[in-house]
Image (tube, grey):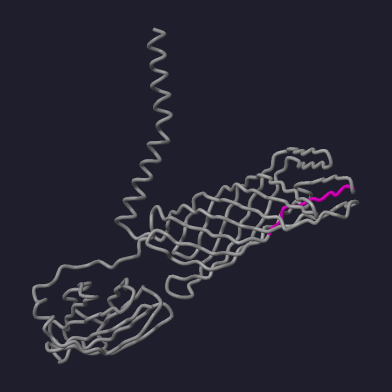
Amino acid sequence: MKTIQKTRNSNFSHIRIMNPYIIALTLLYILQYQNAHTQRNIELTVPISVQLGLSYAQKDVDTSNVWLQGLSNAVVLNTGIGILYKKKIGLNFMGAASANTYQFNKNNGEYSISKIGFALHGNIYYRHLIKKRNYLLFGLDAGYIFQAQDRVSAIEPTFNAETFSNASVRPFIAPEIGLAFNAGKRFYASLLATYQYQFERSKIVTIQLTDPSGTMTASAIGDYLGFKIRFHYTLFGHLEPKHPILNRPSEHDEFIKRENKTVETFSTKSKNLKIQLFDNGEIDGDIISVMVNGEYVLIEHLLSKEPIQLKLRLNSGMNRIVIIAHNEGDVSPNTMACKLVSGSIRKTLTLSSSLQSSVNLEINVD
């Protein structure tokens, strides 16, 4: 009986342990399935960044008057998980390991000490498109730096150095500004300037150097001015909304033989385009089809006073929208009103097509 009881407990524990994994795998499958079959505005990313910074250790006491403090350097490595919404607003949750090196020099020697720290922080940023694939980025880091208590000594016949720090948890913020650019379908990178400010203004490290000429004591708070390179790898990418593609009608071979008359050409920065089509005159049975870059998005639609709206996703570069007449209604030719909306562009056109020629709209996405 004891053996059976142990077995049951073991199985029950196994099931309890496996439940989170089953749930995680299920969510992962759903996310992947939706990513493949629906429109998504969110990218799940892995951010990795390297920061190089400069700080300064302030002299507190110097009876020797021989030591010069150099600029201290900081190296910080960050990684974590992030999301990017509509390629504009991002949020990262990251952990970091840092090494701060403090240097002091005199005529016949130098001394340097490195301190290791860790941080947990969030990062929020906004990307503003300034050119195709290039963005201006504004961001902010906020979190906590964790430091352990330690003491390091170096003793020589004519020189003694001691470095010590107290255990602390220090909140900080670090605004950032720079440029971001897409480096591929799954990669994008940022080049940023940043300044880390610690709200706790007590000393993060104290260094005391003693030689025959006297004693110098210096300390640092931990603020630094730095440069950051951040890479993002997209685990599940942003799926650009795509309009439905319809099967070619039986008259397709006839349609492509017709002359295409270009009636409007314009440029836009947005890949999203809304078209409204309706009969702005006498309702006489006009029937049309619409092609976008050679693919049908509307087939044999009877025009009326009620607009039909098409939400289209354009390609980079030149796009061609062809409006084809299936007939000329009771009153020739086939006429309609067309309203176009793309980004800040608004256009209202009056179009007409016939059995000899189709209407062609050219839209360049730059």
**Does the magenta portion include 219?**
yes
Question: Height in image: 348 above or below 86?
Answer: below
Q: In this view, does 26 lie to the left or right of 131?
A: left
Q: Where is the N terminus found, in terms of image quarters?
A: top left
Q: Compare residues 225 and 345 and report the one nearer the observer.
A: 225
Residue 248 x %, y %: 14, 71
Residue at position x 37%, y 83% from top? 267
Magenta residues?
214-224
Residue 217 x %, y %: 84, 49
Outermost residue, top side:
1
Give the main secondary structure, helix, strand or loop, of the magenta stretch: strand
Q: How many numbered discs, if any? A: 0
Residue at position x 77%, y 41% from top? 164
Q: Is residue 346 left or right of residue 190?
A: left
Residue at position x 39%, y 17% from top? 8
Q: Where is the C terminus found, in terms of image quarters?
A: bottom left
